[in-house]
Image (cartoon, rainbow, N blue to C red):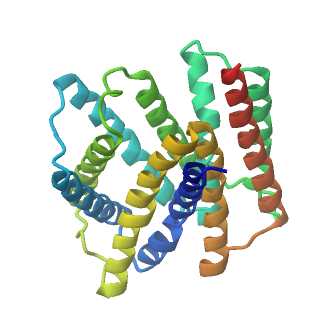
Amino acid sequence: MKTDQIAGYAAGIITGITYGLNPLFAMPLMREGANVDSILFFRYFIAAALLGIWLLVRRQNFRVSGKQAIRLLILGLLFTASSLCLFEAYRFIPSGLATTIVFLYPVLVAIIMVFLRVYPTWQVWLSIIVTFIGVIILCRNDSSGQMQWTGLLIAGASALSYAMFIVVINRSTRIRTVPSTMLTFYSLLVGSAVFLIMSLSEGHSLTAGIHGPAAWMNLTGLAVLPTIVSTATLAVATRLIGATKASVLGVFEPVTAILVGALAFGEEITTNVITGIILTMAAITFMVISSAHKAER
């Protein structure tokens, strides 16, 4: 295996692991009474500031056209909605399960493309069916057999928002000329503004529930690892080993989140959880790989 390939696989694994660390930093803040809007504001603001400084050092041109600005605003709102729904889902279902549901975004991308008259193959349809069977199993409680509808729907909204984010990036010709670092920067900037407005409009103090060095370390951890590092390593992995293999390595996201939930917060790993995760991850991996093979022919 070439050095570039090894680096690409390593970057893809780091992407999945760092994004899966979202609950590790967010849950302690939420348990201390910090508002979700405030947590996400500081996460986005710190990340945007750090990324902005790096872009200035590299003398990056921040100028975009008016039409690009509109699309960047839409992308920023979708990116923001995905984060907001994920963190809200933590209130209703275990953090590991919420992250696993968000990992369904490739399936939702395939479904959205149907409405754009891009029809999936039978392999993709099979993957979609198996994925939703896995989700149904995943979101049932072993003792009562009840669906956790609230958490499921909110986490599903997070996945849908991110799927739409991906579709807009892939389908918009005006966005293709915007570097990925600039796209990330403007998405973070939009998110910072949205969460600041939401927090102030609801009368929340931005620092309510955020006390002491530990809280600020968690906020910085959110800004650096699941945001900046995961985005940067995803770009590296995509460039070195391709988007398909990088997407497959995304299976480390739910695995990491499940382990964090169990080890750090005592979340239960039931038979349903294990079965559901295996089904969903296997189905999504099969879908991505089979789609890549078709594209190569």
Query: Is residue 289 shown above or below 170?
Result: below
Query: Total of numbered circles in the picture?
Result: 0
What is the quadrant of the C terminus in the image?
top right
Q: Position of residue 193 (x, y in %)?
A: 22, 51
Q: Quadrant of residue 196?
A: bottom left
Q: Residue at x 22, y 60 (%)?
A: 49
Query: Is residue 202 shown above or below 82?
Result: below
Q: Quadrant of residue 54?
A: bottom left
Query: Is residue 270 shown above or below 75?
Result: below
| Residue 58 in the figure: left or right of residue 227 | left
Q: Position of residue 69 (x, y in %)?
A: 22, 31
Q: Position of residue 257 (x, y in %)?
A: 61, 65
Q: Quadrant of residue 179?
A: top left
| Residue 60 in the figure: left or right of residue 286 | left
Q: Position of residue 167 (x, y in %)?
A: 48, 29
| Residue 263 in the figure: left or right of residue 204 | right
- Residue 201 visible in this rendered orientation of the protein: no
Q: Residue at x 67, y 62 (%)?
A: 255
Q: Residue at x 67, y 23 (%)?
A: 296
| Residue 29 in the figure: left or right of residue 267 | left
